[in-house]
Structures are given as structure tokens and as C-alpha cells.
Image (tube, rainbow, N blue to C red):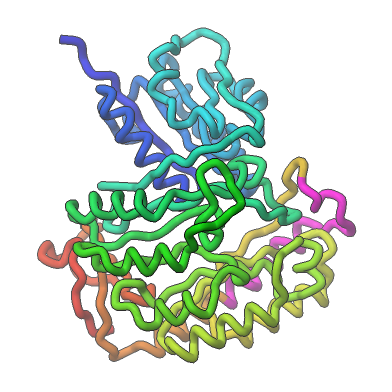
């Protein structure tokens, strides 16, 4: 009997990519492949790429070089956003055998069967405008929380972003299909589901990219709240203009949806928000935070912010810093602006020097650290529910409270993958 071919995966980027990698893994395992760790020797290596920042592109190249050194006869498959945006560029990387764009990602088994080492790199891609359909995905067995993809693509045209070019039009799963996937997950050991998408609040547009929204994100979370067998849900990231009062009020009254929002801001300057082509002003963002904190004073709020965007003066950056400093948010994800091909941001001047971008990043990361410390201290002495991870890290285990405070304690097997009351 022939030995099973082995396959190893590496994921770059967002929670959405993690959910898709996990689904690709199960797809290939069903086709007879045996999954192995990326650090091991494998017959096939699959890299699921991101292209939000320049570092993601560089990391892809670095990973291919590593594979070439340790396993030169193995097949190397690149998929994900970078593969859709720059297939020819990736195909020229020595060692790459197959490049799968957005439309062919989930046909990976078929393409690998027809692949032989030594041929020139094969590109299977298409014009992003022609992409329709929705491929449901969720992560499983990788960690205590599961990332469940319910939406894909984006109809927004932020001036810095390549995601619409990499993933196509906004389109969603149906509530019926989402509930079917959640029912399946409820039969496993999964305790928490994180809802993911490119523009999650835009949920409801059909798999064909139909603009008519017969279902909404609010409809979805109301139905999910009724499912038996899942203890916790999180909303991964939602645009402030799509985070409605009814969604906030619903989460405040739900026992299953965690008091935790991640809301992209990008800049605290209305001038910069205009240059970025964002669909709100800082006043709306502040209103959303105010309502959340009024209804849920204990709620964690994460913020995405970009520093060094073209046209950002010292005064604009100070506006952002002062706005965030005064805002009752918990932590920041700070991104240093990096130029992306075919984006409108390339036409905006003046360009901010790299060293100033890096200084501004450091300043906001320090602010984030102080805010997280303050938020954590507010909860000292409280008893909150913590979902502990399975991993034993040198005798230590980690978990997160309902409101996303990280907790570490000596490893206890009976706490692994359990929601436990803990005094902080």
C-alpha cells in the first residue's frame, strides 16, 4: 500500500486566512493527504499569504527559501491574497510550483494531483471581477477558539487597501448555512466561535455579489445566540459605520456574545480619514465607543490605526494621538503605512519618511500598552469567566476573560478548554 503524501501549511495574515487554511487542510486530508507540522519534511508545502503589508510579501519569499534549503524536492503551493494580486511575481520565486488565485484556492486537491516537481511554476488565477460564490471555512483543532468565516470580499475602496483587488466583491454565506456549520462545531469540543470576514458588518450580500441584502449581520447574531452547545461568540472586527446601536444593545444583553469589540479607526483626524476614503468621521467613532461603555463599562475595545499615511503631518498625528488618549478604548493594533501597488494612496503627497512612520508607530504602541495596563488594573480583584487554552507552555497555561484580558496560571489539565471562574 502506497504511503500517504504529507502536506504542511503556513498561514500569514488575518483570522480569515486561518479559517481558510484549516478548511484547506481538512479538504486535503479527505483526499488522502496526511497533515504534518510546517517545520517537518513534507511532500507538499502550502503557504496561505496576506498582502496587507510589505512584510507579508517578504515573509512569503523567506518561507519559500527555507523550504528550498530543507526539502528541495517538495512541491510548494502559494495561495491567498498575495497570490491573487501578484501571481507572476510569485511564480518567479525559485522553488514555487503552483500559484492559486482566489477562484482556485478551494480546488487545491485537483491542482496538486496534476503537479510535478521540475515543471515551470503553474499559475491558476483569474480577473477578480469575475469571482463569485462563497466558500464557507472554519478553523478546527488548532486552538480552543474557532474562526468561522461568514463573509468575504469588500465593496469599499479605501485608498490604502488592496483587499478588494485580492478578494473581490462583498458576498456572504446564508444564515441557514452558517447555522449548519455552527451546529457541526457544537458537536466538537469548541467552546468559542470568532465570527470573521473582510467586512463583517456588510454580511447579507448574496454569494454572487448581489447588492440586495435580504439578511443582515444583526439577523445573524440573533440566530446564533439561540444555538445550543456553543458557550461564547466574538465579533472579530466591524466597521464603525456598520456597528449599529441595535448590535451594541444586543451584545450588551447577550450571555453568549462577549463584551469585546474590535473597531477599525485608522486615524483620529477627519482630514486623514477623508484622504483614506473611510466612510465615517471621528465623531461617529466616539459615539460608538460612548454607547458601548455606557451599556458595558467592562467591555474591551480594540482599535486598528495606521501611522505615516501620505499627507499625515505632525499636527494630524497629534490629533490621532490626543483622540485615542482621551478615548475609553483598551488596546491598539498599530500598522505602519506601506505602499501598495495600484492604490489611490500612491497619488497623495507629501510622503512621510520611513523613520517618522516608525517613530509614530512606537509612540502609539506605548499608548496601547498603557491603556491595556490601565484596563487590566480596573478589573483586579474581580471574578471573571476565563476560557483556558489546551497548550501546556512549560507548566503555564493561558486563557482570556470574556472581556479579553489575558490570564496566565500554573497548568491544570482540568482547566484546559474549559470556561472557569477566576479571580484576577
Q: Where, by quadrant of the figure, is residue 341 drawn?
A: top right
Magenta residues span 343-367
Residue beneath the point at 21% across and 57% down: 390
Task: Determine whether, in the image, residue 247 is placed left or right of residue 209.
Answer: left
Q: Quadrant for the C terminus, please.
A: bottom left
- Judged by its main secondary structure, the magenta piece is helix
Q: Left or right: 330 with respect to 316?
A: left
Q: Residue furthest left?
A: 414
Give the x, y percent position of residue 256: 30, 72
* 55, 207: nearer the viewer: 207
Residue drawn at (32%, 31%), measured in percent from left and top? 27
Asked whether the viewer can see residue 291, the reply is yes
Q: Quadrant of the rendered structure where residue 42 is?
A: top left
Q: Is residue 65 visible?
A: no
- Identify which residue is drawn at 32% across, 70% down: 400
**In the displayed structure, would residue 173 be above or below residue 74?**
below
Q: Position of residue 280 (x, y in %)?
A: 70, 71
Q: Residue 251 location in percent, x, y?
A: 40, 77
Q: Among all residues in the image, which is located at the extreme right?
A: 349
372 or 102: which is nearer to us? Answer: 102
52 above or below 61? below
Q: Does the magenta run of residues contain 354?
A: yes
Residue 269: x percent and y percent? 76, 75
Q: Is residue 81 magenta?
A: no
Q: Is residue 245 left or right of residue 324?
A: left
Q: How many marks?
A: 0
**Quadrant housing the N terminus:** top left
Q: Residue at x 54, y 34 (%)?
A: 102
Residue sitting nearer the eye, 212 or 123: 212
Amino acid at each position: 500500500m502506497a504511503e500517504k503524501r504529507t502536506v504542511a501549511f503556513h498561514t500569514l495574515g488575518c483570522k480569515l486566512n486561518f479559517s481558510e487554511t484549516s478548511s484547506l487542510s481538512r479538504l486535503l486530508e479527505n483526499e488522502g493527504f496526511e497533515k504534518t507540522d510546517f517545520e517537518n519534511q513534507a511532500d507538499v508545502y502550502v503557504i496561505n499569504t496576506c498582502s496587507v503589508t510589505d512584510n507579508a510579501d517578504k515573509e512569503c519569499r523567506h518561507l519559500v527559501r527555507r523550504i528550498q534549503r530543507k526539502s528541495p524536492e517538495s512541491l510548494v503551493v502559494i495561495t491567498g491574497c498575495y497570490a491573487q494580486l501578484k501571481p507572476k511575481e510569485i511564480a518567479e520565486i525559485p522553488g514555487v510550483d503552483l500559484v492559486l488565485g482566489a477562484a482556485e484556492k478551494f480546488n487545491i486537491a485537483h491542482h496538486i494531483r496534476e503537479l510535478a516537481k521540475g515543471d515551470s511554476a503553474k499559475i491558476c488565477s483569474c480577473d477578480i471581477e469575475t469571482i463569485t460564490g462563497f466558500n464557507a471555512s472554519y478553523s478546527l483543532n488548532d486552538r480552543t477558539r474557532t474562526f468561522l468565516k461568514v463573509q468575504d470580499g469588500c465593496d469599499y475602496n479605501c485608498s490604502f487597501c488592496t483587499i478588494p483587488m485580492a478578494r473581490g466583491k462583498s458576498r456572504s454565506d446564508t444564515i441557514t448555512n452558517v447555522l449548519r456549520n455552527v451546529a457541526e462545531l457544537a458537536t466538537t469540543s469548541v467552546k468559542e466561535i470568532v465570527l470573521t470576514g473582510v467586512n463583517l458588518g456588510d454580511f447579507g450580500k448574496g454569494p454572487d455579489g448581489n447588492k440586495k441584502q435580504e439578511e443582515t449581520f444583526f439577523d445573524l447574531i440573533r440566530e446564533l445566540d439561540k444555538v445550543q452547545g456553543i458557550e461564547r461568540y466574538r465579533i472579530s472586527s466591524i466597521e464603525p459605520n456598520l456597528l449599529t446601536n441595535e448590535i451594541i444593545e444586543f451584545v450588551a444583553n447577550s450571555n453568549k456574545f462577549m463584551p469585546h469589540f474590535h473597531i477599525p479607526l485608522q486615524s483620529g483626524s477627519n482630514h486623514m480619514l477623508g484622504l483614506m476614503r473611510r466612510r465615517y468621521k471621528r465623531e461617529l467613532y466616539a459615539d460608538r465607543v460612548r454607547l458601548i461603555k455606557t451599556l458595558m463599562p467592562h467591555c474591551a475595545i480594540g482599535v486598528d490605526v495606521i501611522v505615516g499615511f501620505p499627507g499625515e503631518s505632525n499636527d494630524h498625528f497629534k490629533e490621532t494621538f490626543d483622540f485615542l488618549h482621551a478615548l475609553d478604548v483598551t488596546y491598539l493594533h498599530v500598522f505602519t503605512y506601506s505602499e501598495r501597488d495600484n492604490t489611490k494612496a500612491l497619488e497623495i503627497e507629501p510622503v512621510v519618511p520611513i523613520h517618522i512612520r516608525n517613530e509614530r508607530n512606537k509612540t502609539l504602541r506605548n499608548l496601547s500598552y498603557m491603556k491595556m495596563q490601565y484596563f487590566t488594573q480596573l478589573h483586579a480583584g474581580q471574578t471573571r469567566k476565563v476560557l483556558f487554552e489546551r497548550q501546556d507552555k512549560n507548566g503555564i497555561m493561558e486563557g482570556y476573560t470574556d472581556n479579553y484580558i489575558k490570564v496566565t496560571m500554573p497548568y491544570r489539565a482540568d482547566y484546559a478548554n474549559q470556561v472557569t471562574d477566576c479571580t484576577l
